[in-house]
Amino acid sequence: MLLAFAVLLVFQCLGEGLVFLLRLPVPGPVAGMLLLLVALVAFPRLHDTVEAGANELLRHLSLLFVPAGVGIIVAAASGSGHWLAICAAVVGSTLLTLAVTALVLRALTPAHKNGKGGDV
């Protein structure tokens, strides 16, 4: 499992370095995941190495949200007096996300491309 964590960390560092050198507007870990995807496609045996560590990380994924939750609670004091704006932003962004997702789904559904109606 230590080898799996090392592989994941190496690809994250490669992604961070690539983003830094090329000044890409993408987070380093995302670039690292794309590099890992390319490596997994190119070298299928790497899958067995990474799978054990990835499954272990996924099993404890909820623990990774604890620091973010603590940060929100700590920063909540600075948001006092702005709760109406914060709630409006959360509700508005949620509705916008739902609408965009529905439009993308409708555009990508094969039934709508063929001109055939029908409920999905």
Image: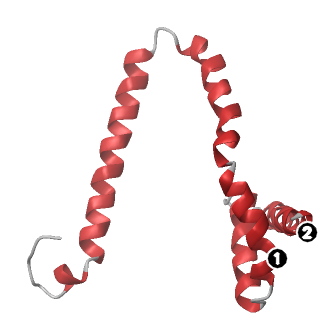
**Which structural element holds mark 1?**
helix
Front-most of 49 and 104?
49
**Which structural element holds mark 2?**
helix
Coordinates of residue 38 in the picture (x, y in percent): 72, 83
Q: Quadrant of the N terminus?
A: bottom right
Left/right of residue 5 with respect to residue 69 in the rendered view: right
Q: Is residue 105 above or below residue 81?
A: below
Q: Is residue 112 above or below residue 76?
A: below
Q: Residue furthest top?
A: 81
Other residues around mark 2 within 10 Å, as few (<14) / some (14–19) / many (≥20): few
Give the CA separation, mark 1 to mark 2: 7 Å
Q: Quadrant of the C terminus?
A: bottom left
The residue that appears at 63% across and 43% down in the rendered structure is 62
Front-most of 77 and 8?
8
Can you identify the residue that label 1 sits on? 49
The residue that appears at 67% across and 33% down in the rendered structure is 66
Can you identify the residue that label 2 sits on? 3
Coordinates of residue 58 in the picture (x, y in percent): 66, 56
